[in-house]
Amino acid sequence: MKDKTRKDIIIIISYIALVIFALVNFSKIFVFLGKVISIFSPFLLGIILAFVLNVLNNFIEKKIFGKIKPSKIWNKIKRPLCITLSLILVFLTIFFVMNLLIPQLKNSASLFTDTLPAYKEDIIGILNKFDVDESTVNKVGEYLDNFGKVITDYIKGNSKDVITVTTEVATSVVNIISKGIITLVFAIYMIAQKETLSRQINKVMKAYLKPKTINKINTVGTLANKTFSNFVTGQCLEALIFGSLVFVGMLIFRFPYASTIGVLLGFTALIPIFGAFIGTAIGFILIMMVSPVKAILFVVFIIVLQQIEGNLIYPRVVGKSIGLPGMWVLLSVTVGGSIGGILGMLIATPLCSLLYALFTKMVNDRLKSNKIVTKVKEKA
């Protein structure tokens, strides 16, 4: 008994010492963790990419090729074929969006520079009708001229800026490509060898951990896989719904670039809650090149639609698929975005859902345990 008490005291003192050390060296530890995360970022991103691709890969394996009879040859080529098709679909989607968006941005910018003089005359005419003083009118005219010059220079390209940007990009392009390749290869390896990895992890756990601990880890792992898979599926469905609503709404209100902006907003809606605002900013720029008035009306339209989407559609589609109430979905996205930006937004919701499910299970188990204890006391 004394040995156990002494052991408990040593453990408590060790914990206190670690907490004090962490508080005193907080900044150094934070910098160190940042470096560690930076080093392992390709692998962390690879795990996230593997979760996303695995959902698509499972769909292709089970829904498309699920009825094909197993054979030695088919069993060997099935997984590589499904992974290849998943990657092709992802890359084609990205290429389609970029190919649709970039030409429209260039065309809109060119159109805007051509129509800017007419806009300038209209604005100056409106200012003169309201008897605005001449100095203010001249300043507005100068501002519009300068703005048009900036757009024109950007379209034509400034050689000095191009050289500077090219130099800056060249210094980091090798690092970006290498990290991207590592991320992709690691994700592919995880999907291709997921059964083998699962067996290896279970083997290591059996060698070093107790059966009770292994069961707890497996429960958390299974729940995490289900949560993240449901999140990816729900998020893609929500993005498809929102993009379709934007497209239909823009056709009804006769906004330009309905198909382009509909696809763009559907793509950016993959970022929970706030992704629509990112797409809206780009859509506003596109429409403003054609009509500033329509651009403002477009923003109003998206704000209304985004409120409906954020409060009604998203919590029910994604929140329901991951078992997380709408209030917690909104809270997790807000906190995740504040901490980790776009990546934080993507990870926060399924992570919060996992914690919510685990906490709910703990509470239910505790309540069951309390009921059993109460019944035993009553019988005694």
Image (cartoon, grey):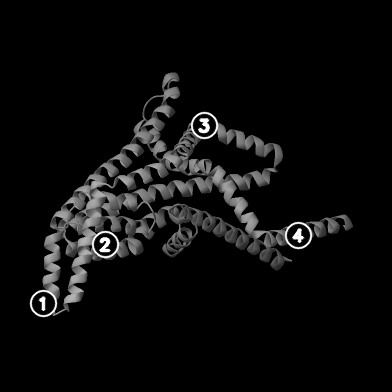
Closer to the N terminus: mark 3 or mark 2? 3
Q: Which residue is mark 3?
A: 193
Amino acid type, callout 4: Ala
Spatial CA distance of label 4 from label 2 is 53 Å
> Which label sits on residue 302?
2
Q: x, y (%) of residue 317? A: 36, 55
The residue drawn where x is 48% and y is 47% is 226
> Which label sits on residue 279?
none
Amino acid type, callout 3: Gln
Q: x, y (%) of residue 45? A: 49, 43
> Which label sits on residue 129?
1
Is the residue under label 3 in contact with that under label 1 (CB below 8 Å)?
A: no
In the picture, residue 135 is in which quadrant? Answer: bottom left
Q: x, y (%) of residue 265? A: 29, 53
Labels in figure, total: 4
Q: Nearer the viewer, mark 3 or mark 2?
A: 2
In the picture, residue 17 is in which quadrant? Answer: bottom right
Closer to the N terminus: mark 4 or mark 2? 4
Q: Which residue is mark 4?
A: 17
Spatial CA distance of label 4 from label 3 is 42 Å
Secondary structure beneath dot 4 equals helix
Secondary structure beneath dot 3 equals loop
| Crowd tier of the residue under label 3, counting other residues whose Cα lies within 10 Å: few below 14, some 14–19, many 20 or above | few
Amino acid type, callout 2: Ile
Left or right: where does residue 48 sit relative to residue 117?
right
